[in-house]
Image: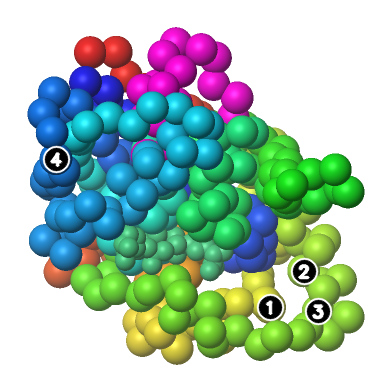
Amino acid sequence: MIRVRVPATSANLGVGYDCLGMALTLYGTFTFDFSQKGIVVSGCPKEYQNADNLVLQAFFSALRAWGLPLPEGVALQIDTEIPVARGLGSSASCIAAGVLAAHAYGRGSETIDAQEVLRQCLQLEAHPDNLAPAITGGLCASFLSQSADDDLPRPFVATYPIQERYRFVTVIPDYEVHTQKARTLLPKTMRYADAVYQMGRCAAICKGLENGDEDLVRHACTDRMQEPYRKQLIPEYDAVRSLAFANGASAFYISGSGPTMIAIVDRSRSEALCAQLADAYPSWQVHCLSAAEQGGVVEDE
Ligand SMILES: Nc1ncnc2c1ncn2[C@@H]1O[C@H](COP(=O)(O)OP(=O)(O)O)[C@@H](O)[C@H]1O
Ligand SMILES: N[C@@H](CCOP(=O)(O)O)C(=O)O
C-alpha cells in the first residue's frame, strides 16, 4: 500500500502566467493498493473511475519511463479536498500523486529527485507552475530550458518561503472552468510595454510574499496578461473583488485559470474577510488558507 498526500496549488498569482504557483493548505490523499489484479478507482467523479484516470496515467507512464516493473493491478482510492476544474490545481495534484507513487513503488525509499519527478510530471501537463509547488511546496517560480544534450526540456524552480502573516482567502464558485478552454481566450502576442509592466511585477510579488511587504504585493498583483481576458468567465469577478478590497484584502487575483478567486490578506483581517465573502456567496466554498511549506509526500502506513 502506498499513500501520497499532495497540496492544492494556486498558479499565476495573477501576474506570473505559467511560471508562478504556490502550494496551499488544502489536500488530496491518494491511496494505492497493489494486492489484487485489475484496475479499480474510487472516490472521484464517475467519469474518472477507470483506467484512463489521470493519477493512473501518471503512475504508469513514470514506471515505464524509468524502466521499472508494472504491478498486475491497482486499487486507487482518492480522498480529496481539491475541487475539479476550479483553478486549484486538481490536475497537477493527480499527476504529482501518480508520479510520486511510482517512485515509491519502483524505487522504495531511494531519495526523491524533485527535478526528475517534475520532469516526468511535465509529460502530462506542459506548464510547471502548478506542478512545481505540488512537488516542492512554497511559492515557486519555474521555467523550462533545453540545451543541445537534453532529450527533454529541463525544469528549473526557484522556491520562496511565504511570510507567516499572509492568509489566502479562497473563494470557490459552484461552477467549473476548464483550463484548456480558458487558455484559448488569451491573445498570441503581447506589446513590449506590457511585457515590461509584467516582468517587474512578477519578480517583485515573490519578494513581497517572502518578506511580508503588503504594499509591494498589492501593487505587483495587477495582471495585464491573462486576467483581463479570463474574467468574462467569472460573472461575479468585479463584485467579489470590490467586496474583498472593501474588507481588508491587500491583493486579489484569479487562481490558475479560475473560476476560484483569491484575496491575499494579513492574518489579523482574514477571518472577518472570509466571513463576509461566505455570507455574500452562501452556495460557494470560501476557505481561509495558508501557504503550504511542504509539497507532495509519500506518507508512512
Ligand atoms: N480525481 C481525479 N481523477 C482523475 N482526473 C482528475 C481528477 N481530478 C481532476 N482530474 C482531471 O483534471 C481535469 C481538471 O483539470 P483543469 O481543467 O486543469 O482544472 P484544475 O487543475 O484547475 O482543477 C479534469 O477534467 C480531469 O481530467
Ligand atoms: N498557468 C495555467 C494554470 C492553470 O491552473 P489550473 O489550476 O486552472 O489548472 C493557466 O493559467 O492556464
**Residue in view at x 61 percent, y 42 percent:** 119
Q: Which residue is mark 3?
A: 194
Q: Which residue is mark 4?
A: 38
Residue 42 placement (x, y as % from top left): 11, 46
Range drawn in magenta: 98-114
**Residue in view at x 71 percent, y 49 percent:** 152
Q: Is residue 152 above or below residue 225?
A: above
Secondary structure of the residue carrying numbered label 2? helix
Q: CA distance from mark 3 to mark 1?
A: 7 Å
For badge 4, the amino acid type reads: Gly
Q: Nearer the viewer, residue 277 or 179?
A: 179
Looking at the image, residue 33 sits to the left or right of residue 155; the answer is: left
Sequence-wise, the earlier of marks 4 and 3 is 4
Q: Which residue is mark 2?
A: 198
**Residue in view at x 11 percent, y 29 percent:** 36
Q: Is residue 110 above or below residue 61?
A: above
Secondary structure of the residue carrying numbered label 1? loop
Residue 147 placement (x, y as % from top left): 86, 48
Q: Nearer the viewer, residue 296 or 232?
A: 296
